[in-house]
Structure formats: C-alpha cells, structure tokens
Amino acid sequence: MAILPILKYPDPGLREISEVVTVFDEELKILAADMGQTMVGAPGAGLAAPQVGCLKRLIVIAGAENDEDFDERVLTLVNPRIIWFGGEQVSDEGCLSVTDLHEKVIRAKEVEVAAQDISGAPLSLQADGRRAVILQHEIDHLDGVLFLDRLSQLKRDIYKRKLKKMLKEDSGD
Ligand code: NI
C-alpha cells in the first residue's frame, strides 16, 4: 500500500466529473487500499478518488458498515449515489483538499446510498449524523463539488483571499 499525494484547492483536477467504474480489477483494489491508507494517515474521515488525481467514482470513508465497528475499518464505496435525503443538519466540515478551512455547512440529516463494493456487488447503506455528512461530502467530490461551494459567497471570498496570501508566503514573495 502507498500514501498518495492529495490534490489541493484550487487544483483544477478537483473540479472534474469522475467516471462510473465498470472494471472491478486488481488495479481498482490497489487504488482503494492506497486511498484507505492515505485517508487514515492524513488523518481524515473520508477521501474521494479525484482528490488523489484519479477520476473514478470511488470513495473511502472511515468505519465499517455497522456503527460498533466505526473507525476500525475503511469502507469502500464504488459508484455511490444518494437515493434518499431526509431532514437537515448543520455541522463543521473540513476537507483534505482545502487547506486551513473549517466551516459550518447545511446538509441532509439522513441519507440512503446505493453503491457497489470493491468487487462490484451492489450494496446499500443508510446513515445519519456525522456519517451522513461524510457521505454527502465525499460523493460531492465525484461531481467536482467542494464543501467550499456550499458556503456563502462572503465566506468563500474571505477564504480565497486568505489562501492567496498563504500561497504567496509559501512561494517566498
Ligand atoms: Ni473533501
């Protein structure tokens, strides 16, 4: 397994639409395993393939399918789609691709997701609370959407200015 480099906003790769996975081969398994290790090492609660420069509809999230095992394992979802949303919640989000930003985002409180496992077998899961947030956040990545896009224009502008300053300082200007 390997730790993969994570693309950082404003990398244009984060804005691409990822492709549906149709081939469930060894390469896909290696990608998922590497993404799991990268997420755990970051550390993060979820990671989407486009964040490591691979435009495939694949995400990994922390935790197993049942909540007792949460944080014990990495759950891999291929071609995940949200098929049902319920309620509303506001919670703090950050992203491994968005440096130094944590903001409150409004999301559905509960979701039902249809996906495939790493071998292509169909699976579905229901989630609420934090886990529902993570699923919505990661699935957004597959369509080139960042949590930043779900903030107010004002908050986005403030962050863009801050980032510009940070990047300038990094380059030694
Ligand atoms: Ni993210």
Image (cartoon, helix red, strand yellow):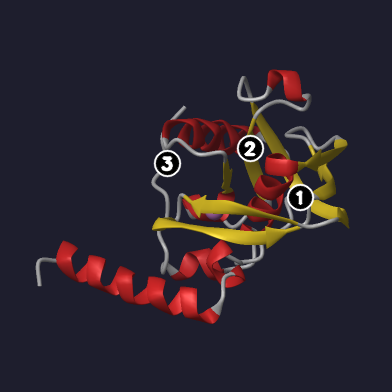
Residue 55 percent location from the top left of the image:
59, 57
- Quadrant for residue 122, please give it: top right
Instruction: Tell me: residue 113, above or below residue 9.
Output: above
The x, y position of residue 119, in whole percent, is 77, 32
Within 10 Å of disc 2 (Cα), the crowding (few <14, some 14-19, many 20+) is many
Q: Amino acid at mark 3?
A: Leu
Q: Kindly indicate whether the residue at mark 2 contacts the one at mark 3 (C-beta within 8 angstroms).
A: no
- The type of residue carrying mark 1 is Asn
- Report which residue position mark 3 lands on: 4
Which residue in the structure is indicated by mark 2? 61
- Labels 1, 2: front one: 2
Front of the two marks 3 and 2: 2
Tag 1 secondary structure: strand
SS at badge 2 = strand
Residue 68 left/right relative to 114:
left
Q: CA distance from mark 1 to mark 3?
A: 21 Å
Image check: 59 left or right of 20? left
Query: Residue at left 48%, top 74%?
Result: 155
User: In this orientation, which residue lies closer to the viewer: 95 or 74?
Assistant: 95
Q: Residue 69 location in percent, x, y?
A: 70, 19
Q: Residue at x 42, y 37 (%)?
A: 42
**Residue of label 1:** 79
